[in-house]
Image (cartoon, rainbow, N blue to C red):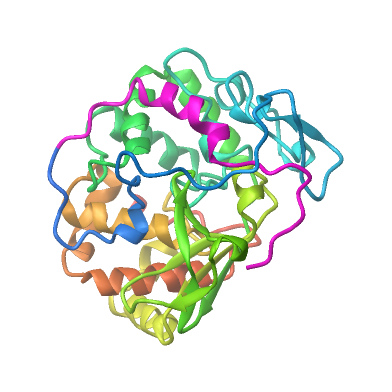
Amino acid sequence: MRRTRVLIAVALVIFGTSAVIAQQNAPAPTGQIPAGLPEWAYTPAPPAGSPPPPSALPADDNANVLIPGTSKTMTRGALRGLKEIPDWHSEDRVGTMPAVVRNGREGVRACGFCHLADGSGRPENAPVSAYHPVYFMQQMEDFKNGLRKSADPRKANTNNMIGFAKNATPEEVRAAAEYFGRQPYPRRMKVVESKTAPKVRLQGGMHMAVPAAEGGGMEPIRADEIVEVPEDNLRAEARDTRMGWIAYVPPGTLNRGKQVVAKYQCATCHGANLEGIGPVPALAGRSPSYTMRQLFDMKEGTRRGPWSELMKPIVSRMTVQEMMAVSAFAASTPAPTGARPTTTSAAR
């Protein structure tokens, strides 16, 4: 696993305080874990009392951090995002970032902290850049009205979103939807078919490759999982929006995924190249972990609402193995570069 040199290591503890604050408004996890839950996609937190990952982060919140590709520095404290989200590459943004995305307020966490300044997100949450505002706003309504939950009751950030959606004003939701809708579609996903994948650990709510110096290396990949990791652990925790992601999948997965797409006629609603049509979201180039969670949530009935109802007849027939294959194939499909089709029968 390639690691880019970083002057100061940015580790999990950066975000400990902000995560605690965010979780204060989240509903308490309830419910049973459904059979067949693909834990690799949901990344539940380690058991209580588990030792934290090794960290070289200094204790001083005033210590400056620098990442490759920019001369900008941020303090460790600034990376907590308690007053303003980290934005290393503000020159990449389109339009003015609204306050709800940049700063948030009491009861509404800044959208850009978890979803990042460009909305590209990370495997543990939604990639919202280039979403049609109509789709974005409907999802917030679904969270608010109890129609969108996680099949895994342990998934704290989904519970957080429910609280934020209830507290956000319609004006804030629209401002965030329009801002993220203008941001370029991310093109940083690489899917690799391989018999092996990096050893991983749970860190920062996602899987990260264990560094070689800490006993890391490659190990056989299971036939029913995807191993999605950042190209650089430290840049991922620093919320670097120019950093890429690698998803390792078992050999033959992409061909099976292509067959599943044809079998269930995914192109009818999501476009010939899964680029999305009008308000129907694009799947191409998105995180396969995220896509897998949404399919499984819909199958389990924990994600409902108008858009999910369109998917219900499809996901009810899909096996977990088919979901995994189509998630990988969609992630491997080149992200759209031009204007997308604007109409589909599914959106009428």
Which of the 4 image quarters holds residue 201? bottom left
**Relative height, residue 231 to residue 198 (above, below):** above
Figure quadrant of the N terminus: bottom right
For the record, the magenta segment spans 1-30
Percent coordinates x, y for residue 85 in the rendering: 63, 28
Q: Could you say which is closer to the camera, residue 174 or residue 80?
A: 80
**Relative height, residue 213 to residue 12 (above, below):** below
* Res 273 seen here: no
Residue at 24% x, 28% y is 145
In this picture, residue 17 sits left or right of residue 337: left
Residue furthest right in the image: 71
Residue furthest top in the image: 106
- Prevailing secondary structure of the magenta residues: loop
Residue 220 drawn in magenta:
no
Percent coordinates x, y for residue 228 in the rendering: 48, 63
* Res 138 seen here: yes
Percent coordinates x, y for residue 17 in the rendering: 50, 25
In this picture, residue 228 sits left or right of residue 243: left
Which of the 4 image quarters holds residue 75? top right
In this picture, residue 311 sits left or right of residue 344: left
How many numbered discs?
Answer: 0
Percent coordinates x, y for residue 212 in the rendering: 60, 66
Which of the 4 image quarters holds residue 232? bottom right
Residue 16 drawn in magenta:
yes
